[in-house]
Image (tube, rainbow, N blue to C red):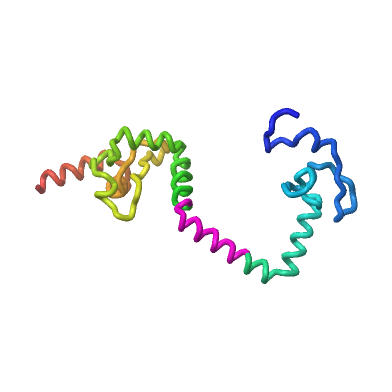
C-alpha cells in the first residue's frame, strides 16, 4: 500500500468484498461508507442501502428528526459562539475570500504597524465593535490594496474609489476651512 491519502481508496478496498444485509449482496469495500468502530472501518450497509435506510427513518420519524436537528444545530452554534471558534473561522474565511492567507494578512498588519493605511489610527481607537482592520481592495480587479479602519473603508466606498471625486472633496474642504 502506498500513501495514506484519504481522497484515494486503498488497494485492498478495490479487492476485498463485504456483505450488505440491506441488498443481500457482496460488494467491494469502496462501496461502503466509513465507520471507524467496525471491521475494515466501514459501515454494515453499502452506501445505497444506508441512504435508503436513513431516508426511510427520517420519513417515519420526521418530527423527532427535525427536533433533534434543530436542538443539535442550536447547541453547536452556541458552543462555537461561546468558545470563540465561530468568529475565528469566519475571519479566516473572510481573509481567504480575498486570496490572502492568514500569514499574508498578519504580514500586512505588521507592515502597517497595526494601523489604518489612511488615517494611521489603531482599530481600538476607531471602533468598539470591529476587532480587525478591513481588507481594502479594488472592486474592478479584486487586487488587495491595504488594510483600513471601518471609517476610511466606508469613505472610499462612498467616493466610489474615484481619485477625481476625492480630489474635488479635498479642494472643497480646503476652500471652506
17 in relation to 70, above or below: above
Q: Is residue 91 left or right of residue 42?
A: left
Q: Residue at x 84, y 42 (%)?
A: 28
Q: Is residue 22 left or right of residue 168?
A: right
Q: Residue 70 in magenta? A: yes
Q: How many marks?
A: 0
Q: Residue 84: image x %, image y %?
A: 45, 53
Q: Residue at x 15, y 46 (%)?
A: 173
Residue nearest the observer in this picture, 46 or 42: 42
Q: Is residue 65 left or right of residue 147?
A: right
Q: Residue 87: image x %, image y %?
A: 44, 51
107 in relation to 153, above or below: above
Magenta region, residue range: 69-85
Looking at the rendering, which quadrant does residue 5 occupy?
top right
Q: Residue at x 75, y 61 (%)?
A: 55
Q: Residue 104: image x %, image y %?
A: 41, 34
Q: Residue 67 in magenta? A: no
Q: Residue 65: image x %, image y %?
A: 67, 66
The secondary structure that dominates the magenta segment is helix
Residue nearest the observer in this picture, 166 or 149: 149
Residue 159 visible in the displayed image: no
Considering every residue shown, the one lying at the far bottom of the view is: 63
Residue 54 visible in the displayed image: yes
Quadrant position of the N terminus in the picture: top right
Residue nearest the observer in this picture, 139 or 125: 125
Considering every residue shown, the one lying at the far top of the view is: 2
Residue nearest the observer in this picture, 39 or 66: 39
Amino acid at each position: 500500500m502506498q500513501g495514506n491519502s484519504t481522497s484515494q481508496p486503498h488497494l485492498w478496498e478495490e479487492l476485498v468484498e463485504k456483505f450488505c444485509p440491506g441488498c443481500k449482496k457482496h460488494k467491494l469495500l469502496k462501496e461502503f461508507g466509513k465507520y471507524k468502530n467496525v471491521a475494515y472501518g466501514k459501515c454494515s450497509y453499502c452506501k445505497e442501502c444506508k441512504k435508503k435506510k436513513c431516508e426511510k427513518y427520517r420519513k417515519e420519524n420526521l418530527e423527532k428528526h427535525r427536533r433533534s436537528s434543530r436542538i443539535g444545530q442550536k447547541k453547536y452554534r452556541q458552543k462555537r459562539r461561546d468558545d470563540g471558534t465561530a468568529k475565528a473561522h469566519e475571519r479566516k474565511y473572510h481573509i481567504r475570500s480575498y486570496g490572502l492567507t492568514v500569514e499574508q494578512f498578519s504580514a500586512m498588519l505588521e507592515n502597517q504597524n497595526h494601523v489604518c493605511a489612511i488615517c494611521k489610527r489603531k482599530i481600538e481607537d476607531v471602533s468598539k465593535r470591529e476587532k480587525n482592520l478591513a481588507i481594502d481592495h479594488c472592486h474592478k480587479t479584486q487586487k488587495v490594496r491595504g488594510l483600513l479602519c471601518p471609517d476610511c473603508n466606508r469613505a472610499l466606498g462612498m467616493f466610489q474609489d474615484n481619485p477625481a471625486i476625492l480630489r474635488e472633496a479635498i479642494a472643497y474642504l480646503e476652500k471652506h476651512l
